[in-house]
Image (cartoon, rainbow, N blue to C red):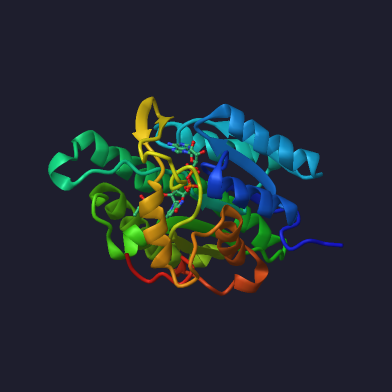
């Protein structure tokens, strides 16, 4: 039986864990060939192995999306391995919080780099490839709608105390989404965004004392939310709980399937009904 994403080539940043991993598995299960990226090699290779074990196709492209040469390498991996590029999901990211008076320039730029500059560079690097693929498709009468899905947050839509850097970057990606939807319509490419509320991943998972850290790009960054805060946050969500990575992946999938071919420039809130924080 044919699948909705059969043969599509999907590039997903930060897909070694959490939401990105769930997106990679979901798109691959529906026939997409996936370029799995992560900073950390081991989880990325595990996702590739999981996709292959299920009969799908995937290849890893390890490294930080913030590295200046990353975008060309990422797009090049798709072209080299699969000779195509149909879906790009700009998902990689993390939070590095502080109130503005304590926030360093390093913290500020780290968030802009990973959530805003990296998607910009990836999409800029993808453009010539997409243009030549579209030209060939038009010449042979093939209709193909490409998809870009960027990832934002309730923090980008409504603000969140302690996240000036992150919320600014996540608000910025919604602007990039609307502008590229206008620039890339002529390339038969839709550009949309999913803004998440609270999804249970390493970023938000309950940490017993609220002091868990992860090594991200060589820095020990605080991750997780303390249990009391998580309980009170969950009470504010109309559905009464945080979402799962699989539920989060569903919203990205919705933009990728043919039923959404005429939807572009939109930001979809995937938050269990939460409409502010
Ligand atoms: N979890 C939530 O509640 C939530 C809410 C709103 C938005 N988001 C966004 O969703 C996206 C995914 O987050 P998650 O919750 O799955 O987090 P996660 O920590 O579980 O997974 C993120 C993955 O991205 C990778 N990554 C981080 N920086 C990277 C870099 N510079 N280059 C390549 N890979 C990098 C990490 O190694 C990790 O594997 C992020 O953009 C995040 O801001 C998450
Ligand atoms: C409020 C806190 C738990 C929070 C808000 C927004 C997030 C996001 O990723 O968009 C979370 O990581 C978290 O910091």
Q: Is residue 75 above or below residue 261?
A: above
**Could you tell me which residue is drawn at 54 percent across and 50 percent down?**
19
Q: Residue furthest left?
A: 101
Q: Considering depth in this image, is 10 or 45 the residue closer to the camera?
A: 45
Q: Position of residue 228 (x, y in %)?
A: 37, 52
Does any portion of residue 88 appear in the rendered image? yes
Q: Considering depth in this image, is 25 or 140 the residue closer to the camera?
A: 25
- Residue 35 placement, left or right of 242: right
Q: Considering depth in this image, is 200 or 12 the residue closer to the camera?
A: 200
Q: Position of residue 196 (x, y in %)?
A: 45, 60
Q: Residue furthest top?
A: 218
**Could you tell me which residue is drawn at 46 percent across and 62 percent down?**
193
- Dividing the picture into quadrants, the one containing residue 134 is bottom right
- Residue 14 placement, left or right of 6: left
- Residue 161 placement, left or right of 229: left
Q: Considering depth in this image, is 101 or 210 the residue closer to the camera?
A: 210
Q: Position of residue 97 (x, y in %)?
A: 28, 43
**Could you tell me which residue is drawn at 49 percent across and 59 percent down?**
242
Does any portion of residue 153 appear in the rendered image? no
Q: Is residue 123 above or below residue 237?
A: above
Q: Quadrant of the N terminus?
A: bottom right
Q: Residue furthest right?
A: 1
**Could you tell me which residue is drawn at 47 percent across and 34 percent down?**
70
């Amino acid at each position: 039986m044919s699948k909705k994403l059969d043969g599509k080539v999907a590039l997903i940043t930060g897909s070694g864990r959490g939401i990105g991993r769930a997106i990679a598995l979901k798109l691959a299960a529906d026939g997409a060939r996936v370029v799995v990226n992560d900073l950390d090699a081991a989880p990325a290779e595990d996702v590739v192995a999981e996709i292959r074990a299920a009969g799908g196709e995937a290849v890893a492209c390890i490294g930080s999306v913030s590295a200046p040469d990353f975008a060309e390498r990422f797009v090049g991996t798709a072209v080299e391995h699969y000779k195509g590029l149909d879906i790009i999901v700009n998902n990689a990211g993390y939070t590095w919080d502080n109130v503005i008076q304590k926030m360093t320039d390093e913290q500020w730029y780290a968030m802009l780099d990973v959530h805003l500059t990296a998607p910009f560079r990836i999409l800029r690097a993808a453009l010539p490839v997409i243009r030549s693929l579209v030209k060939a498709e038009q010449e042979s009468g093939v209709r193909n709608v490409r998809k870009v899905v960027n990832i934002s947050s309730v923090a980008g839509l409504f603000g969140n105390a302690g996240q000036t850097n992150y919320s600014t970057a996540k608000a910025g990606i919604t602007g990039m989404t609307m502008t590229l939807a206008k620039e890339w319509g002529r390339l038969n490419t839709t550009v949309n965004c999913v803004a998440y509320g609270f999804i249970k991943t390493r970023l938000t998972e309950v940490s017993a004392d609220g002091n868990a850290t992860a090594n991200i790009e060589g820095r020990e960054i605080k991750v997780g939310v303390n249990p009391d805060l998580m309980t009170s946050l969950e009470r504010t969500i109309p559905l009464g709980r945080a979402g799962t990575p699989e539920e989060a992946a569903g919203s990205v999938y919705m933009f990728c399937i043919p039923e959404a071919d005429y939807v572009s420039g939109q930001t979809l809130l995937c938050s269990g009904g939460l409409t502010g924080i």
